[in-house]
Amino acid sequence: MIDTPTTRRAKHPETGGERPAVLECRDLSVHFDAPDGRISAVNGISFDLHRGQCLGIVGESGSGKSQTFLAILGLLASNGHASGSVKLHGEEILNVSRRRLDAIRGEKLAIVFQDSITGLTPHKRIGEQLAEVLTQHRGLGRAAARAKVLEMLELVRIPEAEKRFRMYPHEFSGGMRQRVMVAQALLCQPDVLIADEPTTALDVTVQAQILKLFKGLADHTNTALVMITHDLGVVAGLCDEVMVMYAGRVVEHAPVDELFYQPRHPYTRGLLACMPRADRDSEELTAIPGQPPDLEALPPGCAFAPRCPQAFARCEQERPSLQTARPGHLKACHLEELP
Amino acid sequence: MGFLTQRRDRQLAAMQAAGRTVGRSLWQDALRRFMANKVAMGSVIVLLLISFMAIFAPLLSPHSMEDFYWEYILVPPTLENGHWFGTDSNGRDMFVRTFYGARVSLTIGVMTTAVALLIGVTWGSVAGFFGGRIDNFMMRIVDVLYALPLLFFIIILVTVFGRNIYLVFIGIGAVEWLTMSRIVRGQTLSVKQKEYVEAARAIGLSNLVIVRRHVVPNIVGPVIVFVTLLIPTTILVESYLSFLGLGVQEPMTSWGTLISQGAANIDTGPWLLLIPGTFLAITLFCFNFIGDGLRDALDPEGR
Amino acid sequence: MLSFISRRLVVALPTLLVVIAGSFFLMRAAPGGPFDADAQLEPEVIENLRAAYDLDKPVTEQFLLYMARLLRGDFGPSITYADYTVSELLAIGLPVSVKLGLTAIVVALLFGCLMGIISALNRNRWIDYVTMSIAMTGFAVPAFVVAPVLTLVFGLYLKLLPISGWNDGALQNMVLPVIALALPQIAILSRLTRGSMLEVMRQNYIRTARAKGLPEYKVVAGHALKAVSLPLVSYLGPAIAGIMTGSVIIEQIFGLPGMGRYFIQGALNRDYPLVMGTVIVYATAIILLNLLADVIYGYLDPRVRRE
Ligand SMILES: Nc1ncnc2c1ncn2[C@@H]1O[C@H](COP(=O)(O)OP(=O)(O)O)[C@@H](O)[C@H]1O
Ligand code: SF4
Ligand SMILES: [Mg+2]
């Protein structure tokens, strides 16, 4: 067991023994075969996830957030390859057979994708799309599945569920479709729910409603929640812990409060500095000057060096490894302290 | 209209894809990408060879296409008697006839495409440029024509007005402009809505200048691709008509006419069909490969 | 759905009218007439004949007369086949063409889709390359080249199949014409299917379906197939038009007594009623089948049905 914030906090309060994680990810890497080389999208990521925990994953677009979890679910594009180890309740699930994956996906591991417009099958009624999850995993009959689906639609606050059951995706608003996606993911009460930028495509008021839905989930169920986002604001209100990713690596991993008040990595600090606030436009996350590195040719040293205001000679030669800055707080930076 | 309609989907998609590219340096990039495409470049070379032969073979050969060699009737291809492609049932030299047919087929292909190009570009750009009611009306006409069995009209046209080669040009051209007009209209409409055109209008450039500077460069790419795919289509329609005896008439000949004569002699002289048939197929292949290559070169992300 | 169909019908009727009027006036606009070739006929005889077919009246009047008859379901008498009415000729030709055309469409759909799906599922493997090369060949080698070659190989060399004749639509007489007619369509349909399949399997909702834990056959059957078939359905109209024009030439090559033969004979002899009759039947078939394709499309795609 590695020393992540989670493992430390997961000590059983009475016995002091360690509670096993629901999901253990070790040294997960993903690369894609490209016409002119090899794209390293994810490079050696490790973390643990426990029951009832909410883990935030932040980073600029292209930093490997989505591919990390698609790899865990066995959903990489056909030119993608994953290596490392991912254990669900102690059982290895990385690169296992399709049969095994089918039994896990939707049942123990569920995901809500960002784009609900293209994420639901356009020519199939919403009700059928939801009910088939139950038919598949629980062997429920038509009527039973329908009843359960209606219940779930109401739980995610979809009005007139009976009527909506027979409608097609294009007849729903963006927010309603996203609720449907959430309902679909929750049908089998999964152990882990992954939400990949579930609010990015929505407008601000609807975003708030959907986040409230997740908040309720995080607070009232034992489902472990992974919230992928490039919006630190989302993380602040929802997560216990945050993992910051840059160029396919974790650069900082800390409890949410610590990350906000005492960031240890210049990149995190950059992200916080341009965090959208009420008095600013919300699309300013990319305001750190410069571009993320080319994943086909990662530099030998720190990937953030070209953009880092604190970079010094060593940064370009030697890659900083992820180390404990303080108990429960990991960072990958050569600097001892941020100035 | 099998071959008229069957290509339309593909063509339309190709055009719309190719429509996204503009700009000087992009043209150079496109050219470089096209040159790197071996299949397409090979096709260009093969087509140039066929065209070269179409122009010069009838001139340089000792035989003329109308010479009857009574002692050589239906002789199979051979290198010995000077009739490399054999002779037909009238003892005429097939080598000369094949390339003479190439000349006629290719000319008809290019000329008819030019007719279609002219009508289609005019119709489409007028509709797209003016928009609104005019556009609506003009495109509705295109829709109705699209739904008609137009090849039947060409057949009626050709039969009742006499089998005249110019009529074939005009008939096929008049049918094949429809897709072209849709493409051009779509491009014109989308360019019109771009900010730089608004800006050009705001600083008072005339319509003509706007069209020349902004609309034309945007249309050229898709049109070039469409033309390379339209030429084989028209060649095919011409052969279809000639095969039915409605197109090119004796003593002139085209691949379609030759194939028709070959089909009539299939039992005694299969080469009469196979040779022009092969050249026709190779030509169609080449144009299609070039069209695909151009589309890929103009729209690299589309692949 | 009903209003959807009726709206389409409203467009279809004017289209048919345009076809009728177009071919009617096109034929009359040309100089000459059906009796030009009969040089031995006395002028009075020709006058009488012209009167018998209403050809002495002004063109618009002829048109109105023709339309009035047409509404009663009467296509008039044929000029070339003097003992037959056009309806009788159509009754001979239509069943042949319909049987040939339908068989070709079914064969084309069957093989085209199958080849496309196999290709897509084995993308960039040898079976994909082989299938797509066959398709490319079918694309570039026209039916009027394929058909004689087929008769040469299977009829004259191998002596397996008859090279011409209808024989009341016996199987062995149908094989070669159907292959020749279906091949170009198979080529296009297989390319379309392959492209569509690859496109659909890239969609986000396919990933969602997999993320739900559905096995691949359920993903394909339940979430992909309908969308895959959409471009095929749109292509159905052009495919039918292609089969029809193709059958004109195929009937000629194989000597089949179908509509195409009457159409060509009619056009060559300026047999106005016969040409009109065949064109109207062709156009009606194309329009109706396009309508059918639209309806299928609307059934498959709920978004279209709504508007
Ligand atoms: N199929 C693919 N082929 C090649 N590269 C890919 C593929 N899918 C994703 N990538 C690359 O992986 C990187 C990480 O992507 P992703 O995890 O989706 O980023 P994000 O953090 O925005 O979710 C991106 O730079 C992208 O270019
Ligand atoms: S290692 Fe160097 S370059 Fe990288 S973040 Fe730390 S200070 Fe910046
Ligand atoms: Mg992402």
Image: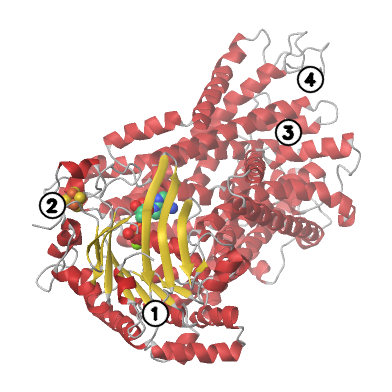
C256 and B229: which is toward the camera: B229
Q: Gap in Å between the C-alphas at discs 1 and 2? A: 62 Å
- What's the residue type where badge 1 is placed? Arg
- What's the residue type where badge 2 is placed? Ala
Secondary structure beneath label 3: helix
User: Residue extending furthest front?
Assistant: A15
Q: Nearer the viewer, mark 3 or mark 1?
A: 1
Crowd class of label 2 (few under 14; some 14 to 19; many from 20; radius 10 Å): few
Residue B182 appearing in the image: no
Secondary structure beneath label 4: loop
The image quadrant that residue C293 belongs to is bottom right
| Chain under disc 1 | A
Where is residue A121? Give x, y as percent.
49, 71
Asked whether the beta carbons under mark 2 and mark 4 sit within 8 Å of each other, the answer is no
C8 and B187: which is toward the camera: B187
Q: Gap in Å between the C-alphas at discs 2 and 3? A: 60 Å
Q: Nearer the viewer, mark 2 or mark 3?
A: 2
Residue occupying image coordinates x 22% and y 69%: A232
Give the labeled residue for mark 3. B260
| Chain under disc 2 | B
Q: Gap in Å between the C-alphas at discs 4 and 1? A: 91 Å
In screen coordinates, is C155 left or right of A268? right
Give the labeled residue for mark 2. B202
Q: Nearer the viewer, mark 2 or mark 4?
A: 2
| Chain under disc 3 | B
Asked whether the beta carbons under mark 4 and mark 1 sit within 8 Å of each other, the answer is no
Secondary structure beneath label 2: helix
Which quadrant: the C terminus of chain C?
Answer: bottom left
